Image (tube, rainbow, N blue to C red):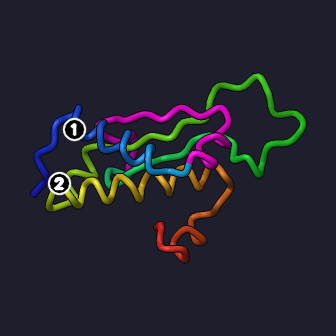
């Protein structure tokens, strides 16, 4: 059963998760927009978050004049997978860190090894 959490409360959980990321890391985010959407597009309906862009480790001298990278946190799948509001808040925090890590070039398998999968 999905957790009953309104859009504003979910967005506040995302904001709180971003506030918990060390300022030194947040200052190194470059050309990134963070979005909250209801559902992912495409076949992966259980996707909690998505990083789309060029990781810092993949940017070369030719990188420039591009639209911002996006980190999207999906409300619907997160609410469906959690049983309590606390679980939602905890899962949002993990998802935010996970997607920010992709911006820094950390691969999926390494995130799982570190416990952020």
Pointer 2 with pointer 1, Cβ within 8 A: yes
84 in magenta = no
Mark number, residue 27: none
Tell me the residue at 79%/27% (across/down): 64
- Vertical comparison of 24 with 108: above or below: above
Q: Quadrant of the N terminus?
A: bottom left
Q: Secondary structure at mark 1?
A: helix
Q: Is residue 81 left or right of residue 34?
A: left
Residue furthest right in the image: 61
Q: CA distance from mark 2 to mark 1?
A: 10 Å
Tell me the residue at 30%/36% (across/down): 11
Tell me the residue at 43%/33% (across/down): 35
In the rendered image, residue 39, in percent from the top left (x then y), is placed at: 31, 40
Q: Is residue 32 left or right of residue 75?
A: right
Read off the residue under disc 2.
Answer: 85
- Vertical comparison of 38 with 49: above or below: above
Nearer-the-camera pick, 105 or 52:
105
Residue furthest bottom in the image: 113
Tell me the residue at 21%/58% (across/down): 86
Mark number, residue 9: 1
26 in magenta = yes
- Vertical comparison of 51 with 108: above or below: above
Label 1 neighbour load within 10 Å: few <14, some 14-19, many 20+: few
Q: Earlier in the sequence, mark 2 or mark 1?
A: 1
Q: Secondary structure at mark 2?
A: helix
Label 2 neighbour load within 10 Å: few <14, some 14-19, many 20+: some
Nearer-the-camera pick, 77 or 101:
101
Q: Which residues are magenta?
A: 23-43
Residue furthest front in the image: 23
In the rendered image, residue 7, in percent from the top left (x then y), is placed at: 22, 34
In the rendered image, residue 17, in percent from the top left (x then y), is placed at: 40, 48
């Amino acid at each position: 059963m999905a957790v009953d959490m309104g859009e504003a409360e979910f967005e506040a959980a995302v904001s709180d998760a971003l506030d918990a990321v060390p300022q030194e890391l947040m200052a190194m985010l470059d050309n990134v927009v963070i979005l909250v959407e209801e559902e992912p597009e495409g076949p992966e309906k259980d996707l909690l978050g998505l990083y789309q862009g060029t990781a810092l480790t993949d940017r070369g001298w030719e990188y420039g004049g591009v639209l911002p990278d996006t980190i999207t946190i999906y409300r619907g799948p997160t609410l469906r997978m959690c049983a309590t509001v606390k679980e939602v808040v905890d899962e949002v925090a993990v998802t935010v860190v996970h997607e920010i890590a992709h911006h820094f070039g950390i691969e999926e398998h390494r995130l799982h090894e570190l416990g952020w999968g």
